[in-house]
Amino acid sequence: MSASGSREFDVIIVGAGIIGAAMACLLMRRGSSASSRVALVGDRFMQAPLAGADWDLRVFALSRASERLLKLCGIWDTLPPARVAPYERMRVWDAAASAHGPGSLSFDCADIGEPNLGYIVDGRVLQWQALQSARALGAVLIEAPLSSVVRGDDAVRAGLEDGRELRAKLIVGADGTESKTRQLLGIETAGHTYHQDALVAHVRTATPHANTAWQRFLGTGPLAFLPLSDGRCSIVWSTSRTEAARLRALDPEGFGAALTAASGEVLGQCTVAAPPVAFPLQLQYAVAYAAPRAVLVGDAAHVVHPLAGQGLNLGLLDCAVLAQVLEDCGGARNFGDLKVLRRYERWRRSENFVAGAALDGLERLFSSAGGFAATARRLGLSAVERLPDIKRRLVRRALGLSGDLPDIISKAAG
């Protein structure tokens, strides 16, 4: 894929993942930006998923707000139904308790009048369809690594490693955890590592998942079973790096036995066809989201623990807020105005900080050893289970049906 035509744009988006492509779609579709010239720059664009390929090991739990946003982008309806798995219930419990007894917490979509609690979506398919939607809407896809960013009073210049230079009113860093855009802007990060890896695999279970997401909190981290449409589950098992290395060294039979034990046999015997893949876990946030003519979204701005599956949802809300702020700013000539971008920063930085801190606190609480911590966890889960109003509020918040939402999400509900 290569650029064609002018190298002058209104917005340059760096990062060809789901967040970058969704951001491009929003800018091309929104009212005041309908004629925007948007460049989507990526180191390397993915190839089309192979026909008959298995589910990607990367799966995402998408909220109702994300569903609405992806519909607005023209992405949602292009996803193959076989790679979108709605789930209706969720059950959470502590390792020292039973999945169905005291010390457990259950959520059901029927309790809040919703058709489901969200969707598990194939990551590879989602990324590919997002890119195709961005291209169909008129975004220019440019394949080349970013090498420099120079900001001036009237424009920002992005240099590419192949020697090309692009100019725009605004550059958006959507290039992930190790964001080159963020580094070139000189924006530092804070946070910490969890000294944990997340083990990811697809497994078959003796007991059907019943369209339910299951999560057990172990002393070394949470273990989640996410239901897939073909009857399998995608697991995300967060554990210490030493333990993760030991588990990865097991043969499929040994890993399946370890997984069955770690799950408390809630879904019976677990069977895997291939070893799991490991991803390091960290909490990271950019000390600033905005600078003159530049802004960060998604993992370039914040990375959270995956225990609640909120990472992509938070990033898509970044895109929605930024799109609304740019729509309200009076036209492309103001896209790079720091006052405009600060509005986005204030809005999303506070929301993302609260989410990151809450997830970090939950991880610390549920990974703490000792009798007192275990008792506190069981009592806490049992208490929330007996408070239906609190449960409804938690579910609505997780679905993106409450909170400080941008109008483009709220109006999409209609």
Image (cartoon, helix red, strand yellow):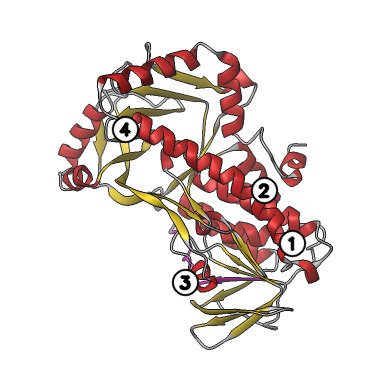
CA–CA distance in space, label 3 to label 2: 31 Å
- Magenta stretch in the rendered image: 38-49
First in residue order: circle 2 vs circle 1: 1
* Figure quadrant of residue 291: bottom right
Q: Which residue is mark 4?
A: 367
Amino acid residing under circle 2: Trp
First in residue order: circle 1 vs circle 3: 3
Magenta span contains residue 47: yes
Relative vertical location of residue 360 with respect to residue 389 in this rendering, above or below:
below
First in residue order: circle 3 vs circle 4: 3
CA–CA distance in space, label 1 to label 3: 33 Å
* Figure quadrant of residue 33: bottom right
Residue pictured at 41% horizontal, 48% vertical:
55
First in residue order: circle 3 vs circle 2: 3
Residue pictured at 69% horizontal, 58% vertical:
342
Amino acid residing under circle 3: Arg
Q: Are there few (<14), some (14-19), or many (20+) residues within 10 Å of tag 4? A: some
CA–CA distance in space, label 4 to label 2: 31 Å
Relative vertical location of residue 65 with respect to residue 174 in this rendering, above or below:
above
Amino acid residing under circle 1: Lys
Q: Which residue is mark 1?
A: 339
